[in-house]
Image (cartoon, rainbow, N blue to C red):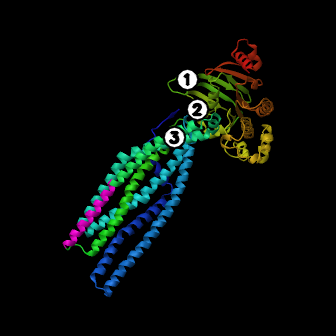
């Protein structure tokens, strides 16, 4: 149901994604970068005054007041430039830090919103742990990308251009050689990074994702691991993935070390060449001791910058690799997006119509529904029964627009579900699923999830109607008790009663019960059936059931088989037809219990 994109990102992809966040606060980033460039420019000129200091001392003998004044003047400028540099540099970092913290939070929020918009099928196919890992890693990779571009490469480039330009003006042979070596160094770094280290970083990032997904899967399924005593087996499987990642990461790191050695040799060649040319100029009387000091300080400035720019380029490539997943999320073409101009759903009496619906999970395969027509009247209580795979749950998901039909239409209160916003549509439908998922929050928060503004009294009243109040009161912190991840601290029946209380409090015109009493004992089921009957009064209710004892009071029972409604009627009417599919299901269930 989705159109996938390849989970890789070019520099252009990553920069286009990052620009969306850089452009949100242009004044702040412009000020920060201007301060950084100014600081770098200030830093680039101080070698001039180092040379002036040395020449001043060399021009006079000890006790020469004029030479001393010239030297002190140059020293004062050097110290002043240092103060200005640190003020501008630190101010730039402070502004940029504020800017980046905001952007990282925005990216994670936007990625959560993006993932929320993906189809049910996408979430069924994806590892939750891997998705979390991709989002958090991608957000911090954005930070790495921004830092290396704006706080690393930009000031380094300004310093190299400035110092090389200054040397070209003062000592052309030294300046030209320095500029050429800078160009060779950067070109070599870019080539090695793009051609050699990028594939290694991509492979390492993919292994890291698989490692995180496996870890989350095992931790989430800890109860099953303990139940079957398979800790050693799971640890062995994890260890195999960890070893595979380790080999990829080690190869990437070793390659990086080899690359650093090669670029270090380039730096050594640069310093040797710069001093050889300067000494040659001095030998010919074309350079002073101050010029030698200028070249020395200029080299150390460039050497520090050039080492950092090499590391910045490597980190930049790593950031692009690690941003690949969130870039892919952003550009993913989802067929389940709200239509342009979608309007909020307007709840009405609760009429539901499926008109000539065609739907299949896989394109090219025989569809599950092919021309299905179904009308559910406002306030009608309809039960869906049939063997597993007959289409009951899929029909429910189409009504909620968790999937889009391939043909025909689903209309609720005369509104095509594709023409309204998904959030407003689903907010108008209360659901009690077969396996209720609870958040690791308080019981009160879970009950009030569909109606966050509900008062404590309303929450308690809903819990009483769902026969959940008694067990909640026995918990150590009552309604404030945290239920654990996915409600693991509660029994299956307790989780289902909390889900029923949540649906009761939501008070929607349309109610869907997907095996809502399947985890309850017979006594609790009897109590809750009474509560559900009261809840269903005046509402359109669709009940998906395998236990036929729960649907006897339905106004209409639809027997489904292979995506078709093969029989419909009341419980009594369907049983009266000897040989009917419903009668066969009823007999089989009575026999097997």
| First in sequence: mark 3 vs mark 2 | 3
Q: What stretch is highlighted in magenta?
A: 262-284
Of 255 and 24, nearer the camera is: 255
| First in sequence: mark 2 vs mark 1 | 1
Distance (Cα) linking label 3 and label 1: 42 Å
Residue 20 screen position, x and y as percent: 48, 50
Left or right of 397 on screen, residue 518? right
Residue 492 screen position, x and y as percent: 71, 35
Q: Name which residue lies at 53% across and 46% down.
A: 135
- Asked if marks 3 and 2 touch (Cβ < 8 Å), the reply is no
In this rendering, is residue 556 above or below 453? above
Picture quarter with the C terminus: top right
Which residue corresponds to mark 3?
239
Q: Can residue 328 be seen in this view?
A: no
In this rendering, is residue 26 above or below 294? above
In this rendering, is residue 548 above or below 68? above
**Closer to viewer: mark 3 or mark 1:** 3
- How would you rate the neighbour count of disc 2 (Cα within 10 Å): few for under 14, some for 14-19, many for 20 or more? many
Distance (Cα) linking label 3 and label 2: 38 Å
Residue 430 screen position, x and y as percent: 70, 36
SS at badge 3: helix
| First in sequence: mark 3 vs mark 1 | 3
In the rendered structure, find residue 367 and report the number of the disc placed on it: 1
Which residue corresponds to mark 2?
403
Q: Name which residue lies at 75% across and 20% down.
A: 571
């Amino acid at each position: 149901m989705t159109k996938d994109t390849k989970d890789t990102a070019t520099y252009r992809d990553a920069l286009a994604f990052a620009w969306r966040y850089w452009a949100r606060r242009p004044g702040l980033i412009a000020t920060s970068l201007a301060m950084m460039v100014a600081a770098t420019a200030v830093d680039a000129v101080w070698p001039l005054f180092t040379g002036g200091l040395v020449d001043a001392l060399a021009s006079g003998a000890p006790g020469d007041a004029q030479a001393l004044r010239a030297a002190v003047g140059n020293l004062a400028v050097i110290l002043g430039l240092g103060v200005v540099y640190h003020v501008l540099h630190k101010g730039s970092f402070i502004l940029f830090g504020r800017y980046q913290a905001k952007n990282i939070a925005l990216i994670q929020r936007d990625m959560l919103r993006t993932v929320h918009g993906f189809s049910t099928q996408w979430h069924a196919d994806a590892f939750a742990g891997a998705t979390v890992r991709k989002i958090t890693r991608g957000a911090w990779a954005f930070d790495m990308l921004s830092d290396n571009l704006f706080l690393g490469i930009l000031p380094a480039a300004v310093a190299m251009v400035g110092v090389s330009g200054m040397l070209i003006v003062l000592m052309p042979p030294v300046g030209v050689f320095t500029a050429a070596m800078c160009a060779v160094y950067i070109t070599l770094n870019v080539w090695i990074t793009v051609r050699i280290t990028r594939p290694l970083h991509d492979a390492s990032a993919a292994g890291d994702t698989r490692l995180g997904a496996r870890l989350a899967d095992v931790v989430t399924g800890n109860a099953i691991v303990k139940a079957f005593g398979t800790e050693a087996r799971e640890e062995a499987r994890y260890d195999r993935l960890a070893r595979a990642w380790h080999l990829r990461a080690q190869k990437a790191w070793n390659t990086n070390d080899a690359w650093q050695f090669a670029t270090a040799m380039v730096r050594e060649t640069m310093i040797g060449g710069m001093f050889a040319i300067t000494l040659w100029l001095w030998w010919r009387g074309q350079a002073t001791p101050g010029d030698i000091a200028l070249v020395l300080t200029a080299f150390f400035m460039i050497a520090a910058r050039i080492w950092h720019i090499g590391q910045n380029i490597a980190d930049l490539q790593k950031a692009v690799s690690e941003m690949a997943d969130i870039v892919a999320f952003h550009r993913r073409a989802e067929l389940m997006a709200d239509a342009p101009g979608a309007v909020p759903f307007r709840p009405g009496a609760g009429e539901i119509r499926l008109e000539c619906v065609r739907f299949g999970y896989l394109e090219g395969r025989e569809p599950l529904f092919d021309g299905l027509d179904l009308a559910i009247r406002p306030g009608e209580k309809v039960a869906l029964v049939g063997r597993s795979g007959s289409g009951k749950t899929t029909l429910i998901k189409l009504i909620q627009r968790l999937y889009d039909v391939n043909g025909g239409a689903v209309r609720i209160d005369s509104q095509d579900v594709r023409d309204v916003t998904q959030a407003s549509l689903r907010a108008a439908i209360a659901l009690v699923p077969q396996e209720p998922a609870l958040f690791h929050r308080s019981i009160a928060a879970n009950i009030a999830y569909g109606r966050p503004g509900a008062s404590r009294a309303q929450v308690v009243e809903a819990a009483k109607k769902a026969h959940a109040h008694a067990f909640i009161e026995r918990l150590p912190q009552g309604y404030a008790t945290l239920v654990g991840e996915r409600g693991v601290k509660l029994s299956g029946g307790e989780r289902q009663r909390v889900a029923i209380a949540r649906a009761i409090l939501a008070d929607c015109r349309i109610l869907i019960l997907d095996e809502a009493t399947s985890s309850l004992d017979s006594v609790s089921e009897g109590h809750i059936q009474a509560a559900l009957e009261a809840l269903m009064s005046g509402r359109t209710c669709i009940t998906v059931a395998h236990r036929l004892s729960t649907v006897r009071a339905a106004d209409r029972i639809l027997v489904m088989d292979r995506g078709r409604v093969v029989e419909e009627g009341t419980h009594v009417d369907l049983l009266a037809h000897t040989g009917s599919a419903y009668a066969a299901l009823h007999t089989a269930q009575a026999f097997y219990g």
